[in-house]
Amino acid sequence: MNPLEIILILAVALIVIGPERMPEVMRAAGKILRELRLASNTVLHELTEVLDEPPPTKVQPPAPTTRESEPAAPPPEKP
């Protein structure tokens, strides 16, 4: 936005709103812009935290253990 556009917008706002309410409207607009900036910074910070975390490591299940005290099963007989 160049300075001419800003002056034009302010002039139209001054005509539509009037000089009495102009400071009140500008203050409200400033508060809204500040809240939007704070919200966007919060979201950006949270996304950066999540994306910078290392991926979770997969825990491998323990390998099945064999019992040495039990005898091995005999092979199946062929008919």
Image (spheres, rainbow, N blue to C red):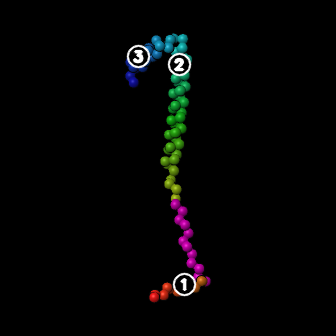
Q: Earlier in the sequence, mark 1 or mark 3?
A: 3
Q: In which quarter of the image is the C terminus?
A: bottom left
Few, some or many residues within 10 Å of mark 2 (<14, 14–19, 20+): few
Check disc 1 and report the residue beneath it. 73
Residue 63 in picture, x, y percent from top left: 54, 71
User: Is disc 3 placed on a helix, strand or loop?
Assistant: helix
Check disc 2 and report the residue beneath it. 25
Check disc 3 and report the residue beneath it. 8
Q: Give the range drawn in magenta.
A: 58-69
- Mark in the foreground, 2 or 1: 1
Residue 48 in picture, x, y percent from top left: 50, 44
The image's mark for residue 43 is none
User: Is disc 2 placed on a helix, strand or loop?
Assistant: helix
Residue in view at x 44 percent, y 15 percent: 12
Q: What residue type is labelled 1?
A: Ala
The answer to whether the residue labelled 3 contacts the one labelled 2, judged by CB atoms less than 8 Å apart, is no
Few, some or many residues within 10 Å of mark 1 (<14, 14–19, 20+): few
Quarter-of-image position of residue 67: bottom right
